[in-house]
Image: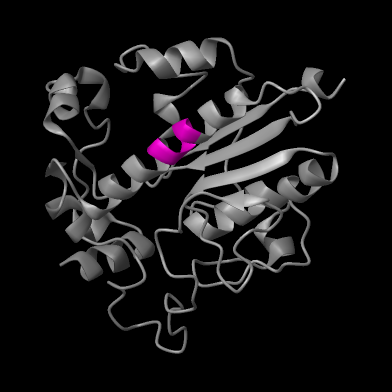
Amino acid sequence: MTSKRPNFLIVMVDQLNGALFPDGPADFLHAPHLKALAARSARFKNNYTASPLCAPGRAAFMSGQLPSRTEVYDNAAEFASSIPTYAHHLRAAGYHTCLSGKMHFVGPDQLHGFEERLTTDIYPADFGWTPDYRKPGERIDWWYHNLGSVAGAGVAEITNQMEYDDEVAFHAVQKLYDFARVSDDAARRPWCLTVSFTHPHDPYVARRRYWDLYEDCPALEPEVGFIPYDEQDPHSQRLYRASD
């Protein structure tokens, strides 16, 4: 009976534009493996993230609760251990719950229901990213994305984020093979493997063999041209000043 329970492979990425995955990968994407996976997977075309930030979005996904309930509002907020997650529920149901990759768990609890963690997190689990909200007028380079994300974009064969994602993928694939090697029905447990990548988080960097696939791609051209500073909304002007 246990072997007939479904297994779950959850793949997470950062800052993936919804236009690229309207209901599975868009037609213009050169992603044969993702398209094959999407073709035989459950897809939710109307889904959305509860928060556009790394930590709040992941806490909401893990718990099924909004940031207003988890109280994880930014990347320096602790995800309380008292909040149940899907990993807790699946583990209680007999699943082997496993995590490979980035989860932005801030605080001493680095598992939140996962039985096993295959990699470290990419960022320290501390409160160092807390903005000084008492000084709203100061430069916000440290707390918001700035022009460095644009200047740093392009082609590279290795970066800190690329190296981390390579490690995440390696350990995830290794674990899938380990699950498949269990031949004893009595020892086999259903599993849930969550694989969480950093990319395509900015700065948008890719290896040459992938970058060149999208040279002169009409679907990636901006639909809205440059908006003069005086015509921008106050928030956009503030970000623009931080990028100057």
Q: Quadrant of the C terminus?
A: bottom left
Quarter of the image where one finds residue 109:
bottom right
How far from the left and from the top, in percent, is residue 137?
34, 83
**Which residue sits at x=65%, y=52%?**
60
Residue 107 included in the magenta stretch of the image: no
How far from the left and from the top, in percent, is residue 227?
22, 48
Q: Residue furthest front?
A: 184
How far from the left and from the top, in percent, is residue 67?
66, 60
Foreground: 23 or 197? 197
Q: Residue furthest right?
A: 1
User: From the viewer's perspective, is residue 55 above or below residue 28?
Assistant: below
**Which residue sits at x=26%, y=35%?**
224
Q: Which residues, given as a range, are shown in magenta?
A: 170-174
**In the rendered view, does 232 fall on the left or right side of 117?**
left
Q: Is residue 16 visible?
A: no
**Which residue sits at x=15%, y=53%?**
152
Q: Is residue 104 visible?
A: yes
**In the rendered view, does 18 fall on the left or right side of 192?**
left
Quarter of the image where one finds residue 179:
top right
Foreground: 23 or 38? 38
Q: Main secondary structure of the magenta part?
A: helix
How far from the left and from the top, in percent, is residue 1?
88, 20
**In the rendered view, does 143 fall on the left or right side of 47?**
left
**Which residue sits at x=27%, y=79%?**
139
